Image (tube, rainbow, N blue to C red):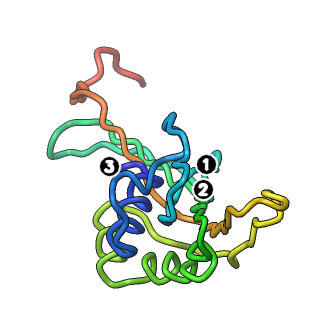
Amino acid sequence: MIEPDLLVAQIVKAYMGLSDRNIWLRSQDIKAPTGEDDLWAVVGVRLPRTLGTKSFLDTDTNEDVQQVAMATTIDIDLASKSTDATTRAWEVTAALESIPAIQLMEKNNMSVYRTMDAVNLDAVEGAGTLHRTRISVIVYYMVEKRKSTIQIFEEFPTEVN
């Protein structure tokens, strides 16, 4: 399974036509570009919340399967020296609600639950010329772990009367 922030970054990159140097994950140690008019995006994930768990035996493989349903908020921060970070913010929402994005998310056991309103963060820069916008989305996803083959007992060594 692909990590939710990486999947969102791939979707936003493809829809908005961003190059590899214009989008990255918050967990990466990359310095923001300087002196460029390009739009760039940073995708970050907050701490996930567990919604539910399920454990069962896959009788076809004799594996212990553990599934955990999770929810997390993913922030997509846009920044630019031009006004693109503000005027193109709608494209993030459109990207995540597009048919190809929904199909890709379903393939990876993920879905967008809610998209928050875009937040204008220009004031963070004060009198600076950097424009910033943050779009946050809540996503649901499922992780699964399979443990090695387990032994199934057909009979118990002790009889209980």
Q: CA distance from mark 2 to mark 1?
A: 4 Å
| Pointer 2 or 1: first along the chain | 1
Q: How many marks?
A: 3
Task: List x then y, in percent, for residue 58.
Answer: 25, 45
Q: Tell whether 43 sits left or right of 131.
A: left
Verify CB contact (< 8 Å) between mark 3 and mark 2: no
Callout 2 secondary element: strand
The type of residue carrying mark 2 is Thr
Residue at 35% from the left image edge and 61% from the top image edge: 10
Mark 2 = which residue?
72
* Quadrant that contains the C terminus: top left
Residue at 51% from the left image edge and 34% from the top image edge: 29
Mark 3 = which residue?
1
Q: CA distance from mark 3 to mark 2?
A: 16 Å
Vertical comparison of 68 with 27: above or below: below
User: Is disc 1 surrounded by few (<14), some (14 to 19) or many (20+) residues within 10 Å?
Assistant: some
**Would residue 9 be seen by someone viewing this image from the given angle?**
yes
Q: Tell whether 123 sits left or right of 47.
A: right
Mark 1 = which residue?
48
The type of residue carrying mark 3 is Met
Residue at 76% from the left image edge and 66% from the top image edge: 122
Q: Which mark is residue 125?
A: none
| Pointer 3 or 2: first along the chain | 3
Q: Tell whether 151 sits left or right of 17.
A: left
Task: List x then y, in percent, for residue 3.
Answer: 41, 48
